[in-house]
Image (spheres, rainbow, N blue to C red):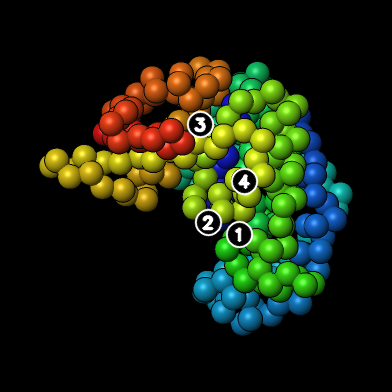
Amino acid sequence: MLILLSPSKNLHNKPKEAHKFSLPRFPEETGQLIEVLKKQTPKSLQKLMAINDKLAKLNVERYHQYSWPHTPENATTAIYTFRGEVYLGLEANTFTPAEADEANKRIRILSGLYGLLRPLDLIQPYRLEMGIELKVGKAKSIYQFWGSKITDLLNEDIASTKSKEVINLASQEYSAAIQTDKLSVPIIDIQFLEDRNGKLQFLSYNAKRSRGWMSRYIVDQKIKTSKDLRGFDLQGYSFREELSESKKMVFVR
């Protein structure tokens, strides 16, 4: 199976050095986006992304510093660069080289700038959410810009890894970039709920960390099917069949 994750806005300043690396597979598309983003001023970027002035200035600088090709001297691997809640749960920094290789086979990270990343793909610091309405050529949004390209590449990865399912641990904003009707295998959504005095609640903060825990569980246990995933029990979670559906698995703690 393949796992879908969202990227992270928070990045490590000095990421762990990977034992090997690969290059993102949409260099031309990323270059197109960068050229459009370079035209943004801090003020226009602040409005576009709803971020503060400091972040706007930082990211305008990042766009102008972007260079291709990426090398270990000017870029770092995605899995060690992202540091949001999902990645804190994944604890990639503790991967052995063999575990990093396994993660590289199984995990795919959706990205507004890079499209679809493998964990060991080199990236440069950036911020570009998938849901941004940025005009690029005839496209009026990042979703329109990527169109079916992400789905097409994901289908190639499904074929090359002989995966039978895709486990969606990405946020709704990012998973919306996948054209599920064109996907060659079923995509299974995962929902994490908290039992608070008998009432089931979805808490975004907890769900993000849980997505990382489950990703690590799949990698460590080499889980191959969603049926085997029912045994996930880290951090007090358990599978709830009565709340689940054919393409949605619910875990509660």
Query: Amino acid type of disc 4?
Result: Asp
| Label 1–label 4 contact, CB within 8 A | no
Residue under label 1, please give it: 130
Point out the tag, 2 or 3, that comes first from the N-terminus. 2
Q: CA distance from mark 4 to mark 3?
A: 24 Å
Q: Residue at x 26, y 41 (%)?
A: 194
Point out the tag, 1 or 4, that comes first from the N-terminus. 1
Point out the tag, 4 or 3, that comes first from the N-terminus. 4
Query: What is the secondary structure assignment of the residue under circle 1?
Result: loop
Residue under label 4, please give it: 181
Residue under label 2, please give it: 173
Residue sitting farthest toward the bottom? 43
Q: Is residue 28 visible?
A: yes
Q: Residue at x 39, y 35 (%)?
A: 245
Point out the tag, 1 or 3, that comes first from the N-terminus. 1
User: Residue 161 sits in which quadrant?
Assistant: top right
Location of residue 207 with respect to 214 vertically, above or below: below
- Give the class, few, some or many, for how many residues have Cα within 10 Å of label 4's Cα (few <14, many ≥20): few
Q: CA distance from mark 1 to mark 4?
A: 19 Å
Q: Position of residue 70 (x, y in %)?
A: 82, 47
Q: Position of residue 218 (x, y in %)?
A: 51, 24
| Label 1–label 2 contact, CB within 8 A | yes
Q: Which mark is residue 215?
A: 3
Is 47 positioned to the left or the right of 74 in the image? left
| Label 2–label 3 contact, CB within 8 A | no
Point out the tag, 4 or 2, that comes first from the N-terminus. 2
